[in-house]
Image: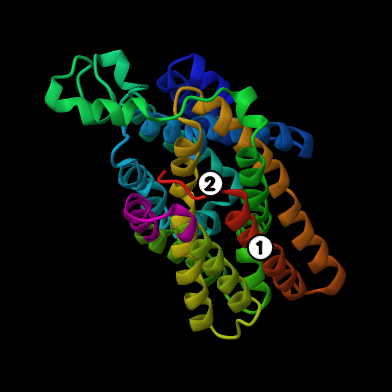
Amino acid sequence: MVGYLVDRASARKVILVGVIIAGLGLILTGLSPNIWAFYLAFVLMSAGVSASSHGVSWSVMVARWFTRQRGRATSLAYMGGAFGGPGVILVAALLESVGWRTSVIILGIGMWIVCIPLAMVARSKPEDYGLQPDGDTIIQNSSDTNASNTTKSSPSITLKQAVKSRYFWALVAILGTQHVSMGGIQAHQIAYFEDIGFSTTKAASTVAISFTISAIGRLVVGILTDWTDWRRVFIAIIIGQIISLLILANVSTYWHAVVFSLILGFSHGMMVPIRPIIGGRLFGTNNLGSIWGTIDGAVVATGVVGPVYLGWTFDTFNTYIPAYYILSVVLFTAIPIVLFAFERKPN
């Protein structure tokens, strides 16, 4: 739905409304009197976050503003998530001080105070301001022909055409396997480290470390995708995620957890911006909101499997470790899909 709205309305409006809904959902979560009210408030909050986060809205907007160095531009735009990572420790401290209800109410109000003004900065597409991507003017001099051709050479594919292509389903399969594994880890990461003897603050610090180091990964992947074949970069990311899973299954000291967090954070940081970069190169930007929103929606749907599977594994075997090995095998299947599904082209 977010992708459809971004293509047909102002991205700024989608982001602004999303921020308002997300903040309201957080506040109502804290005020929920029973489990069903909690679920409804959580769904409301999740819908708002979907509209306002970098998943679809911001990624499509950045892709429309940049062509020649889209990789680097996307990476820089995605640095915000990394800067917010250390906030996990503050949230954990807030939780221990005032409880979860007051914490989410404070976070909801804070989201309004910080994010509503920032949402107003968003600019949906360059054509609204008499420009083309990269700041080019619509009327080009002959010396600017190359820049104009760069923009025109970008493919323009409809959602219907994209769904019929193997690229679409290959991306769903690859990103789906990643979301099953990474989504499961992120949902249970703190619980796992607490289960093996770490304090809540130490367990939360592993998340903070991952998000902080992801800043480097987000920056590096933009440079690499502008410089070399994105398929090689994609495979390197998958290998890094597999290694992090295998380390996680064998953690016995806090320093092992730190190494896991560093590798996972760097790999995850690279994965976040490379997805819309690939989407823009394969499908163009005219209908990227609808196309990428559909892909992302399908991927999120498959990602539900990871947290549930890890939870079932722990409930059944009283340990998460067997699931980590199985998920590493599942993740490995994405490598041959990358190699065989995408034919090698300059873009």
Residue type (three-letter) at the residue carrying disc 1: Leu
Residue on which disc 1 sits? 331
Q: Position of residue 180 (x, y in %)?
A: 68, 55
Q: Which mark is residue 103?
A: 2
Residue at point 60% right, 69% down? Answer: 242
Magenta residue span: 217-232
Q: Is residue 44 visible?
A: no
Give the number of the disc on residue 90.
none
Q: Is residue 88 above or below residue 314?
A: above
Picture coordinates of residue 9 (x, y %)? 47, 14
CA neighbours of label 1 inside 10 A, class few (<14), some (14 to 19), many (20+)? many
Label 1 or label 2, whichever comes before in sequence order: 2
The foreground one among 91 and 73 is 73
Q: Is residue 9 visible?
A: yes
Q: Quadrant of the N terminus?
A: top right
Q: Is residue 183 above or below residue 321?
A: above
Residue 324: % across, % down: 70, 70
Query: In the orientation shown, which residue stands out farthest toward the bottom?
Result: 252
Q: Say what secondary structure mark 1 lies in.
A: helix
Q: Is residue 314 left or right of residue 12?
A: right
Who's the residue at 82% across and 61% down the image? 312
Image x and y of residue 305, in percent: 76, 52
Residue lying at 77% horizontally and 39% vertically, measured from the top left: 35
> Is residue 222 part of the magenta span, yes or no?
yes
Mark 2 closeness class: few <14, some 14–19, many ≥20 residues within 10 Å: many
Element assignment for label 2 = helix
Who's the residue at 34% across and 40% down the image? Answer: 70
User: Which amino acid is tagged 2?
Assistant: Ser
The mark total stands at: 2
